[in-house]
Amino acid sequence: MPWAAVGQSSRLQTLIPVDRLSHADRSVCDLRIREGNMYQNSRRIAACRQCAAWVDLNQRDGTCRRHAPQAGDTPDEVAHWPLTHTDDWCGEGLAATSTVQHEVRCEACVYWRRPPDGLFPYGRRDQLSEWWRHAGHCTRFSPLPLPVPGVRAFWRVTHATDGCFDGEAKQS
């Protein structure tokens, strides 16, 4: 049964079955769903294995692709997707059947920046040169404030075939 969050603010919201909503509340919830508010969908996810943003690696482990990488403080640092267990979960999970939001591959994302010939960082040995030819910087999020002044921010590197649910597809 679908559930909806109803209330004045996100901290004071109550989850109730959609079939018990008034017409006015139902139209507000439908509007939230169309606008991509994932709060309603996250309550239905009981484990990472049920989430659309989770990539299965083996019987027990997978990676979470829910969010794009944050900026870091090291040039050309490769983004590594967090490893989780099948039975882990979070409050931002996306029902695998959800049509509200979908994964956007890096190569198709408006926030991904790749030089024409790829990246060729000096002295990096964590990936093969062929991998770097298809790599670019994820600029989805601006750098976060730091407690130390003068620290330069750098956007993390992802591969063209990577993807996340924070991306926005380029218009054709």
Image: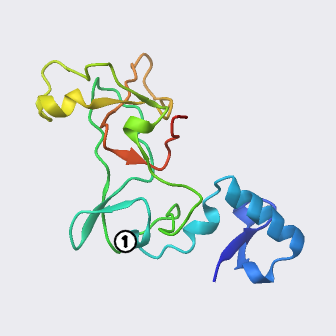
Q: Residue 118, how many percent across, how many down?
A: 26, 23
Residue at image position (57%, 62%) is 99
Q: How many labels does the image show?
A: 1
Residue at image position (73%, 73%) is 14
| Left or right of residue 9: residue 149 | left
Residue at image position (11%, 33%) is 128
Which quarter shows the N terminus? bottom right
Q: Nearer the viewer, residue 85 or 57?
A: 57
Identify the element where label 1 is drawn: helix
Q: Residue 26, how many percent across, how many down?
A: 81, 70
Q: Which of 139 and 8 is in front in this view?
A: 139
Indicate the colouring scheme. rainbow
Which picture quadrant has residue 136? top left
Crowd rating for badge 1 (residues with CA inside 10 Å; few <14, some 14–19, many 20+): many
| Amino acid type of the residue tagged 1 in the rendering | Arg
Q: Residue 170, how many percent across, how many down?
A: 51, 35
| Left or right of residue 26: residue 140 | left
Q: Where is mark 1, residue-wise?
A: 49
Q: Residue 72, how many percent across, how many down?
A: 36, 31
| Placement of 32 over or under 133, stated as above or below | below
Which picture quadrant has residue 11? bottom right
| Left or right of residue 128: residue 160 | right
